[in-house]
Amino acid sequence: MPNAHRPPDGCGRFAAEWVRPDATRSEATCCPPGSTGLRLAQAARAIRASSRPKLPGTLTLGRVFVSAPWNDDAVTSADEDKFGRAGWAARQAGLIDDSHAIDSSLVYGLEGPWGSGKSSVLSMIEDALDALAANWHVVYFTPWATSTQEELFSEFFAALSSAIPPDNEGHQQVHEKLGAYGKVAIPLLGVVPVVGKPLAESVDRLSAKLAKPWKTVFEDLAASLEEAELKILVVVDDIDRLSPDELLTLLKVVRLIGRLPGIDYLLAYDEKTLAETLTAARLTNAISTAHARQFMEKIVQYPIQLPPMLESVVIRLFMEGLNALPLRERSVDSLNTDVFHGVVSEVMIDRLSTPRAMGRYLAQLRHAFDVVDQGEFDACDLALITFMRLHFPDMHRALKKWRTELTGGGTARTFAAALAKGDDAKDAWKQEFFSIVETSEREDASRLATAIFSRLGTTGAATVRFDGVEQNANDAANRMENSTYFDRYIVFEVPDGDVPDGELTGALTKASEGNTEALRTLVLAEDDDKSLLVMTRINRRYGGLEIEPKPSSTDAPVSVDLIKAAASMLGTIQENPHEFVSRRRYLIAWVATLVRAQAELSSYEELQSAFDSCTSYARRIEVLWKLKNAGKLSEAAASLRDKLFDTEGERAATVMLEHLATGDTADLDVPTQMLISVILDSAASDSFSREVKNRIDSGILDLATVASRCVVLDSSREQYVLGNVSLQQVTGEYLEQVAEYVGTDDDSPLPIWSLQQRREWMSAHISTSASQEERPAVEPQA
């Protein structure tokens, strides 16, 4: 058999061995006993009868096989078959051999969608014909590799000539007559139509002008071919690649010129694409897809449909491909989730049902896992976004435009605005987002995108509240729907301005062992956005106070040294205490979380010493306030909190007395209302109240000064209010509740009243209250 040229196209090749669905040999010949590969093969066999098989087995760190780099080359022999098609190809070769006649010419059409492995099947049919020892001569003709009509004709006759072995005198005569026939046929082909009455008329008219009539040359060549009894199969692959004009030219060759006795044709194409091309060629004024198919019936006598891969085979190959990826244990866990398996069974399997689609996706996925640091990505999202990029490119390109909606990222104002919208308003953007994809593709695209971005689901994302802001529960992981990780999945790396998770983990680990330099560099970075990003991720790792404390882990260590480090930074950081989201708020929440988690593991003295690393008494009290308002605490955590409160209550009493004595020039940053609350909740409450009353009675203090420390800004209502309950508990004096609205019509910041302004406001209020004849007697409230 000639070593025919095969174009570099067709079904993809896997270097790994696998058990075919109809294999009779033992699986152990390619998978050792007890191996994951053997279990997957057996599982695939067990589920073959199911209409919708489930994914067999789970991913492991072990390799089922070691795969060579994927390419899209066709296999060159049945020995390389990985999809169980060698037997089917042999049966088609038998059909071709049985149907062959030395006095006629047949045309076979191998039909299959792009990427289904037609080129590989052609190679296996060639091998099977060779195995029949039936003296077949197979030649490949590649019309789409030519650029002009003349080149196509010349290439055809050259290919046909190469199939005739020059091993005897009769074959030499066939060569000579074929050359003569080409000289007559080539000019004839350039002017005759493809269909209709004009076809025969054109042949007769032009033949009369030739030195030797075309019919005479044709019959002379045909007689020589019959006498030679040659079996020639001309294989023409990918004819659906041709333009309408090129396709019509090829069909003229096959239908008019190439119908020589003993020469059969095997055309390979995607039937749907071919019909569309013929429709565009407008063979008649009223051609339709149906007419195009009827036209092909005149050309192809034996249409052969390439059967699709069994779904169980697709699943098993997919699982084997995943197991061949260079996965870390964390990635394996992510790919074993119900979310990933659900998308695989409902979307991916149908779209990876051809060798090319399967090989292309797994190759892209292998590359993705090779180039990224897996510790910085969620493996499930990485696999899904790679699939989206290949199969839904328009949706993938639009992700950046819809980032805010998909991730819920943005400022506190963005969160508040989103929460204020009604359900209809919140869902409207989803319809617009999905409209990016064609209607026929929308169901699969929706299922895929929702697996990555839970906000696209009918119920939306599961949410938790952190520091007054409702956020996605999945934000705790390095998922793409987490706004701080989104860009990584767009560029497939950790972008500038981002902080690698590995770097943060290393900094936390070192700080938990007493080395705080790396952590301080990250948390106290001059770049506020980067610093806030770090604190956001830290708090999401540790989970906050609303959930049960997590035990110390590699990603989220807990130790006395780490409490010292966090408390020290809390005392150092300088920010506006009235900001809605800030590094200070995140640090306060983190320190409170660490203290609670360590409560049962260390003594009070160790924890008090670590807590005191925060040099700001105001920040320490804010931490205690967090603990005071936390959910259910363990007995040890509650006891520690109470002891810390008592200690800080005594300190707060000292600070407050000094603050009151300083008058209007005292530090406005001190949260006096919070200090008073801590004092009243501690063992220092009675002694502090007695001292304040004594100072008022002796004229050292006045009631307005004390009341000014109970005035706070209620930013949600844009007003200043008097904490009259705290004032009454400290002084025994009752004042009516009073508020002063300070909001503006624009978005300008609310004014910050000085202590003098607050005292003067209270003086006026006290004067008004004193003018009343009688004050209601109210028992002090706890």
Image: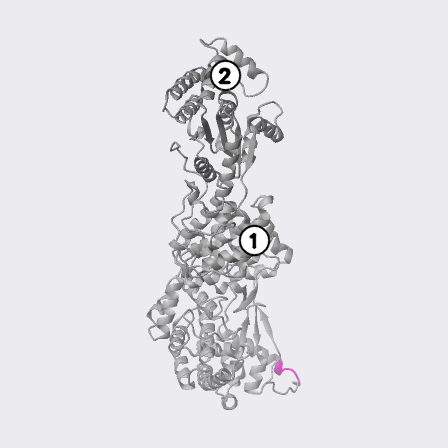
On screen, residue 155 above or below 690: above
Q: Position of residue 217 (x, y in %)?
A: 46, 14
Residue 651 is tagged as none
Q: Which sits earlier in the primary sequence, circle 1 or circle 2?
A: 1
Residue 402 is at least partly visible in this image:
no
* Residue 419 appears left or right of 667: right
Toward the viewer: 689 or 535?
A: 535
The magenta span reads 769-773
Disc 1 versus disc 2: nearer the observer? 1
Q: Amino acid at mark 2?
A: Val
> Is label 2 in a helix, a strand or a loop?
loop
Q: Quadrant of residue 81?
A: top left
Q: Position of residue 177 (x, y in %)?
A: 42, 17
Amino acid type indicated by mark 1: Arg
> In the image, 7: left or right of 716?
left
Say if the magenta span includes residue 577.
no
Eyeballing the image, is 509 above or below 358?
below
What numbered label is drawn on residue 48? 1
| Cα separation between marks 1 and 2 | 55 Å
Q: Give how far across and how far down residue 291 sits, in percent.
A: 61, 28
Tell me if mark 1 has few (under 14), some (14-19) or many (20+) residues whose alpha carbon lies within 10 angstroms of its own.
some
Q: Which residue is mark 2?
A: 191
Q: Is residue 770 magenta?
A: yes
The quadrant in which the C terminus is found is bottom right
Q: Nearer the viewer, residue 533 or 265?
A: 265
